[in-house]
């Protein structure tokens, strides 16, 4: 009996899926790696997949609340970036510990994502022109393109990570709901912004016609 509960017999345990009848064996020696994978997924989901989009929505639609919008935007982006650094570091560690197991797509997107985000931070902190500078328009376009590109890549890589890790349908479903809600909020705010622009242009045109009539 002692041999049954000692030695190699306790180095692994299994989980049984009663619906499929599939038994999955999990080695205790790799439990630390599994915990890091879970941490890696959670950190990246919160940083790239939630904080970054929230920061972009704030910057796009709440500039009337100046300068509060900028502080909230910067806080979201910096927290997201530092979380991304931690996620990138754990990803490198997992790659080192999982020799022979390659997820080239996930890894390449992760490296690209980290490089773009780092470039964005460096440009934002050190190369941002004044608002009155004529070069500011080019900086704005760069900031927008890299920023939104980073958000899109982050969401794509998070979904790829869910497919790789397979933590359970509930986790992926919850994230899809979260990002869907953020997308709906952004769409509503964008529609509101365009409606206000059209109303403003209509009022300006009416005022111009009124002035022209009074002159005649």
Image (tube, rainbow, N blue to C red):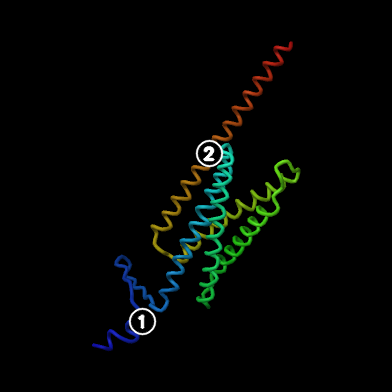
Q: Residue at left 23%, top 88%? A: 1
Q: Residue at left 46%, top 69%? A: 36
Q: Is residue 147 left or right of residue 40?
A: right
Q: Please name whichever residue, 165 or 83, is drawn nearer the observer in this view of the structure.
A: 83
Crowd tier of the residue under label 2, counting other residues whose Cα lies within 10 Å: few below 14, some 14–19, many 20 or above: some
Q: Is residue 34 left or right of residue 103?
A: left
SS class of the residue under badge 1?
loop
Which mark, residue 11?
1
Q: Residue at left 47%, top 48%? A: 180
Q: Is residue 88 left or right of residue 29?
A: right
Measured in 3D between alpha carbons, the distance from the residue under mark 2 to the one under mark 1, in whole angstroms, is 54 Å
Quarter of the view holding residue 199: top right
Q: Quick check: 216 above or below 157?
A: above
Q: Is residue 49 left or right of residue 173?
A: right
Where is residue 139? Give x, y as percent.
70, 48
Q: Quick check: 69 above or below 9?
A: above
Where is residue 73? Give x, y as percent.
56, 48
Q: Quick check: 147 above or below 105?
A: above
Q: Residue furthest left?
A: 1
Crowd tier of the residue under label 1, counting other residues whose Cα lies within 10 Å: few below 14, some 14–19, many 20 or above: few
Where is residue 69? Give x, y as percent.
56, 43
> What residue did someone put label 2 on?
189
Could you tell me how many numbered marks the image carries? Answer: 2
Quarter of the view holding residue 18: bottom left
Between discs 2 and 1, the one toward the N terminus: 1
């Amino acid at each position: 009996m002692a041999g049954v509960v000692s030695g190699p017999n306790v180095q692994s345990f299994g989980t049984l899926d009663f619906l499929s009848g599939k038994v999955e064996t999990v080695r205790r020696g790799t439990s630390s790696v599994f915990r890091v994978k879970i941490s890696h997924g959670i950190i990246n989901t919160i940083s790239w997949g939630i904080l970054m989009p929230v920061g972009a929505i704030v910057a796009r639609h709440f500039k009337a609340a100046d300068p509060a919008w900028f502080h909230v935007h910067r806080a979201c982006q910096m927290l997201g970036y530092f979380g991304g650094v931690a996620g990138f570091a754990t990803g490198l560690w997992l790659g080192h510990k999982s020799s022979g197991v390659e997820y080239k797509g996930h890894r390449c997107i992760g490296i690209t994502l980290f490089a773009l985000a780092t470039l964005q931070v460096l440009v934002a902190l050190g190369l941002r022109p004044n608002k009155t500078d004529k070069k500011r328009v080019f900086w704005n376009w760069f900031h927008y393109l890299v920023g939104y590109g980073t958000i899109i890549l982050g969401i794509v890589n998070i979904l790829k990570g869910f497919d790789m890790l397979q933590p359970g349908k509930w986790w992926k479903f919850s994230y899809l709901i979260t990002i869907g809600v953020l997308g709906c909020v952004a769409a509503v705010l964008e529609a509101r912004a365009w409606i206000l622009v059209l109303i403003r242009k209509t009022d300006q045109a009416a005022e111009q016609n009124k002035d022209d009539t009074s002159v005649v």
